[in-house]
Image (cartoon, grey):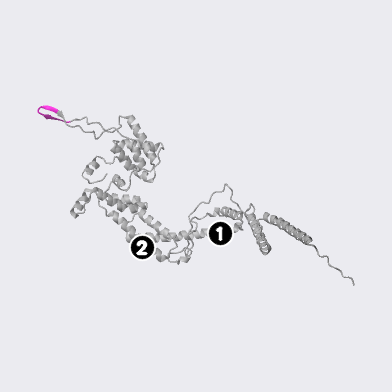
Amino acid sequence: MVQILENNPTFSQQLGRALGEQTGKFASNFAEDMALKKRGVDVAGLTGYARDVAIKEGIKRAALIEQGRRTLGPQGGTAQTQGSKAIQPTQAAQPAAGAMPTSRQPSSQRPQGGTSKIIIPPEQIEAEAARRGTEKLNRGVPTDLQSEIALIQQENANVSQYQGYQKTIGDQAEAELGKVYKRATPEESAYFRRKGEGLATQGLSQAQIDRELARDARNFTNQLKKLDETPGARARHKVGQAFKGTGRTDEQRRREIQAAAKPLLDEGLYESVRNRLHSNGYGPEETESLISDLSEQAKKSLSDFNAPAAPKDKNFKYKYKEGKKEALQATQDPTYRTYANNPQGQQEFAQNLQKTLQSDPNTNLLLLRKAYEDKGVDWNTFKQEFDSLLESGQIQLNDDQMNMSEYLQEPPLDRLDKLLADFNFIGR
């Protein structure tokens, strides 16, 4: 009997065979990794089952991305080019009956915060969908044109619902203010309406909104009434104050008005404060001095300017004493216009006025005119140079300055006004 012995491989042979297998497997995986990477599938470092799953899902995702790119291409859709117009906001169309959330709907049915605040117009939806889709595909997120269009249409519906709900709460806020304060001006009603619309974005329940609006309406009304009840400065007011024992010094009155006006001014209700002070007998310049002041830049520019004093009145009056004719003390001519016969001086004033307005473009024009008047510049000279700067385009006016500029076309007080102001019947 012949015994056949197996030829067992040596250790070196086993090692060589294992290295060969591993090298071949590594080369095969490397080539596969590179091929997959070109298709957008990255499985580098993965082995076994995890690698197989990643390859399967990656190929599926790559196919979806490629399909999405075809829908966003020239044949499948209109991709937004560099020259495409940006999305322009438009007003939301009112939802159909039953779609708009009412103030009594539970909070789960109301639109939540974070929704975009604009409606994308129908003619821009496809271009915007293509832009969004391209961005997602570049990040490796599968999508297509129709999916992005559907998302935008849903967003538009959400915004429309959101804006409808805001309007509902805004209407409620305006009505709540009307219950406790009948004399609210359009500006004050609009302000409180905005407060209501702001509450609509906070995800509050209807009960919470009702409570907030009722409390805010009472507080706002108290602020308005407090300003209405501040003491007036005219003769008729002072007579009543003296009779009641409620008189105040000018400084006490000023501090009281500023304290009452501050909460309203902090909310931007300047016109409301002006109108209420005017109703209480304060003139335009008095009102501005109570609620505003010249900036440090304007004051610094003004400090660089000094106007010449008006000349003495030529119509001297005389008295006779012991047979001798003596001149009474001559006074400054009240009708003198500082620069009527002084072109160089007027040019210096014009330069300083331009410098002052450029140092603070939002300066208070009525207070500025008064500051120049205190330096000897008559109102007509101020008006002439101000109009010249405005017409030449060297200054631009904001809304408040546009309203104030109407007062600059006339003197602060005419002859009759001066007489009435002397008796404290009117304010400056």
The amino acid pointed to by label 2 is: Ala
Marks 1 and 2, how far apart at CA: 38 Å
Give the class, few, some or many, for how many residues have Cα within 10 Å of label 1's Cα (few <14, many ≥20): few
Q: Which residues are magenta?
A: 317-325
Q: In the image, is residue 353 above or below residue 7?
A: above
Residue in front for this viewpoint, 248 or 68: 248
| Residue found 31% across the figure and 29% down from its top | 342
From this view, report whether residue 338 is shown above or below residue 86: above
Q: Secondary structure at mark 1?
A: helix
Q: Which numbered marker is on residue 214? A: 2
The number of discs equals 2
Specify whether residue 182 is in view.
Answer: no
Position in image of residue 44 (x %, y %): 66, 57
* Relative side of 196 to 418, left or right: right
Question: Farthest residue in the top direction?
Answer: 324
Q: Is residue 183 left or right of residue 9?
A: left
Q: Quadrant of the N terminus?
A: bottom right
What secondary structure is the magenta-colored segment mainly? strand
